[in-house]
Amino acid sequence: MQVAQEYLGEVDARITRMATALPGGLGLRGGTCGILLAGLAAVGLKYGSTERRERKRCGELELRVHDFFEELTRKEFGTINCRDISGCDFTNPEKAKAFIGSKAQDRCALLLADTLRFVLPLLDDSQTAK
Amino acid sequence: MLVAPGSLVSDFLIGQAVVESAGCGVCTSNYSALSFHKGDTMMNEAERDLTGYIERAKKYFYDGYT
């Protein structure tokens, strides 16, 4: 979320703080990968609306992000869930500590990079105009 | 104005709900109608250099924001 905001040219620390709930599969519980969630949130930041009727474009782009990430992780992990991808139960302090510096962490960093390569261009109006 | 940023960001929750809600005819139909272009990433990256953003994201991932 921090980088998405930088890409959009305006950083709001509140959004960065809000996004701290995402890593570890939502509150460290191992659910949907925080990389995917942040990618979706970045799209919401750019195209979301406080008016429900103005959310069509945002919804379409979110589906593209979700499909991309699912495709990215399906073959190797078979899931979009943090615990399956990272192999770590982040609610366990010892396991969370062991994750730091591990190959699994590097794999997550690659996923992050791949996802950003897809998501950031979507934040450019010229790339998403139809 | 204080509400706006959170509301915009939280739109992704609706998107996630749409994707995760199996069995909804409307959602399924919208889902299948969407085109997913695997080539998007490479094409767009060529138009705008993302290297700095991605490297920064990795740094944040490993070391935090400060």
Image (cartoon, grey):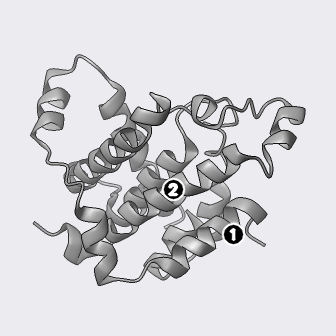
What residue is shown at x 47% (from left), y 47% (from top)?
A: A36
What residue is shown at x 24% (from left), y 54% (from top)?
A: B38
Asked if both marks, 1 and 2, belong to the same chain, the answer given is yes
Quadrant (top left/top right/bottom left/bottom right) for the N terminus of chain A: bottom right
Location of mark 1 (residue):
B59
Place of residue A118 in the rendered image (x, y in percent of width and height, measured from the top left): 36, 61
SS state under label 1: helix
Crowding at label 2, few (<14), some or many (≥20) Cα neighbours within 10 Å? some
Q: Amino acid at mark 1?
A: Lys
Location of mark 2 (residue):
B6
Rendered position, A109 above or below B55: above
Relative placement, left or right, of A24 versus A75 is right
Cβ atoms at labels 1 and 2 below 8 Å apart: no
Rendered position, A101 above or below A29: below
What chain is tagged by disc 2?
B
What residue is shown at x 65% (from left), y 45% (from top)?
A: A21
What chain is tagged by disc 1?
B
Place of residue A108 in the rendered image (x, y in percent of width and height, measured from the top left): 60, 49
Please indicate, yes or no, whether residue A12 appears anywhere in the rendered image.
Answer: no
**Farthest-out residue, right:** A94
Crowding at label 1, few (<14), some or many (≥20) Cα neighbours within 10 Å? some
